Amino acid sequence: MDRDIDQINVIPLVDVMLVLLVIVLTTATFISTGQIPVNLAKAKAVGDRKDVPIVITLTSAGGLFLNDKPIPDGGLPSALTTQSRESAVVVRADKVTLLEKFVSVVDEIRGLGFQQVSLEVIRL
């Protein structure tokens, strides 16, 4: 009963791939880019950063966060006093945020001496 095997048995391969898929999907739910829910605006051109920037989040309700820590109204200058002025600052603003609020936050950051201020968006 010796036969030549002329086909590949794909059932074990499919089983292994399904197990790997379940592992990836399970662990992917625990990884998130930010803890504060923000609907980012969309853009066609997106820049990639290699360094770790200071992240300022502006929610649709007007809440302000520095690296996922809440900042009270008017507390942005005191929250940024310990940060290096050469650090890059990324503003994550909800797409329904009032433009006036966004501009005032960016203006306040630039007024504190930070020159590298950018807006985080998602690619179309």
Image (spheres, helix red, strand yellow):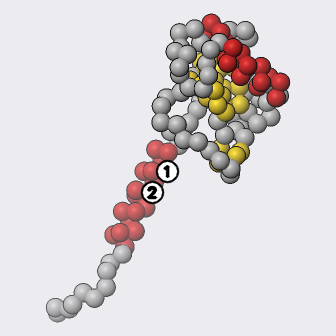
- Residues 13 and 68: in front is 68
Number of labelled discs?
Answer: 2
Asked if one can make out residue 36 in the rendered structure from this viewpoint, the answer is: no
Q: Residue furthest left?
A: 2
Circle 1 Cα neighbour tier, 10 Å, few/some/many (<14 / 14–19 / ≥20): few
> Where does the image place residue 90, in percent across and percent down from the top left?
61, 29
Q: Which residue is mark 1?
A: 25
Q: Secondary structure at mark 1?
A: helix
Residue placed at 62% from the left, 6% from the top?
78
Residue at numbered disc 2: 21
19 horizontally vs 8: left or right: right
Label 2 neighbour load within 10 Å: few <14, some 14-19, many 20+: few
**Residue 102, numbered label:** none
Q: Residue at x 45, y 54 (%)?
A: 22
Instruction: Give the answer, above or below, for where 20 lies relative to 26.
Output: below
Label 2, secondary structure: give it: helix
Residue shown at the point (71%, 22%) measured from the top left: 106
Tag 2: amino acid: Leu
Marks 2/1 in contact by CB < 8 Å: the verdict is yes
Residue type, numbered disc 1: Leu
Q: Nearer the viewer, residue 92 or 108?
A: 108
Q: Quadrant of residue 5?
A: bottom left
Q: Residue placed at 65% from the left, 12% from the top?
A: 112
Residue 94 location (% of width, % of height)? 73, 33
Q: Nearer the viewer, residue 32 or 20?
A: 32
Up the image or down, 53 lies above or below 31; here it is: above
